[in-house]
Amino acid sequence: MQAIEAQGPECTDLKLVERPTPVPGAGEVLIAVEAAGINRPDVLQRQGTYPPPPGASDILGLEAAGEIIAIGDGVKTLAVGDKVTALLTGGGYAQFATTDARQCLPVPKGLSMVEAAALPETFFTVWSNLFDRAGLKRGETLLVHGGSSGIGTTAIQIASRLGVHVITTAGSADKCQACLDLGAEKAVNYREADFVEAAREFGKSHGGVSGVNVILDMVGGEYVARNIKSLAPDGRLVNIAFLQGSKVELDLMAVMLKRLSLTGSTLRARDPDFKGAIAENLRKTVWPLIESGEIRPVIHQTFQLGEAAKAHALMESSQHIGKIVLTA
């Protein structure tokens, strides 16, 4: 099969090569990939700072959509010919990929394969961190940093459709407007305004308490202290990445006085049972919203598989709104 191999840290080090077609193991399926989503962890893996977990493919790509063409022993819930979108531990930038059957979901009715390929990584991540880990509930307030990113556009849509009041940050007027169009009630251009004060006022206008209930952050660095200032009493800060660094100096007095919870997680190395439980929650709660048209993945641009270097360059430029997708 053809696959993209990372031969060095630069975008131009992504090369189209021939690799053996993988064989599904017990509990796994083999997918003929029609489209694969690009995510920030792929960039980090290419740069050498986010290696795949033991046993995972070294080929980039954490999500893909396509048709099942073979199944391993013990697979009872899926069959050859099924159209699925799947969370992967690696291997998506290729013509064929394997994954545990529990990490597959049906392609939602009305979605193209490109749109379906843009779902798993961000939807699994958002659900696991906001609703399972942070316990986000209807009527609460949520601050989403990087609202125009793949994670951001997903978080805004899911949370707002489930009755959460969403405020977000983005880096331009166009990106802020895109966030508002997706369901955010307020969008702050972080280059021009202080999101701390905006979050405090947003909380007052939705419950009368200064600050928001939950923050989803992938920036880190100096944002961590500002996030703590932005949280309401009993607030929860969830970090899923640290684009500005994970080492910070903090005065934790506010954490104690406001009874805050600081948490975070990574998804890739978790076992298939854990990911399968997320898949079931998405199937029951979010998939109907996608099929009704209330939620739709935001696709910024697609590239052919052999153009992975161009796709990574776009990802690193942060000029996109939503997802970048490779097509086979």
Image (spheres, rainbow, N blue to C red):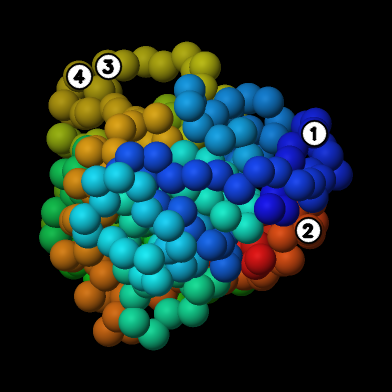
Q: Quadrant of residue 109?
A: bottom left
- Measure the C-alpha gap from mark 4 to mark 1: 47 Å
Dot 4, crowdedness within 10 Å: few (<14), some or many (≥20)? few
Contact? badges 4 and 3 (CB < 8 Å): yes
Say which of 252 and 28 sits in front: 28
Q: Earlier in the sequence, mark 1 or mark 2?
A: 1
Residue that numbered label 4 is attached to: 256
Q: Quadrant of residue 226?
A: top left
Q: Earlier in the sequence, mark 3 or mark 1?
A: 1
Determine whether, in the image, residue 45 is placed left or right of residue 285: right
As drawn, the residue found furthest toward the right would be: 12
Q: Position of residue 256 (x, y in %)?
A: 20, 19
Discs 3/1, front: 1
Determine whether, in the image, residue 86 is placed left or right of residue 106: right
Contact? badges 4 and 1 (CB < 8 Å): no
- Measure the C-alpha gap from mark 3 to mark 1: 46 Å
- Measure the C-alpha gap from mark 3 to mark 2: 51 Å
Q: Which amino acid is tagged 3?
A: Met
Q: Position of residue 95 (x, y in %)?
A: 63, 58
Residue that numbered label 1 is attached to: 7
Discs 4/1, front: 1
Say which of 23 and 307 sits in front: 23
Q: Position of residue 326 (x, y in %)?
A: 65, 62
Residue that numbered label 2 is attached to: 306
- Measure the C-alpha gap from mark 1 to mark 2: 14 Å
Q: Earlier in the sequence, mark 4 or mark 1?
A: 1
Dot 2, crowdedness within 10 Å: few (<14), some or many (≥20)? many
Q: How many marks?
A: 4
Q: Which amino acid is tagged 1?
A: Gln
Can you tell which mark lies on residue 253?
A: 3
- Measure the C-alpha gap from mark 4 to mark 3: 5 Å
Is residue 246 visible in the rendered image? The answer is: yes
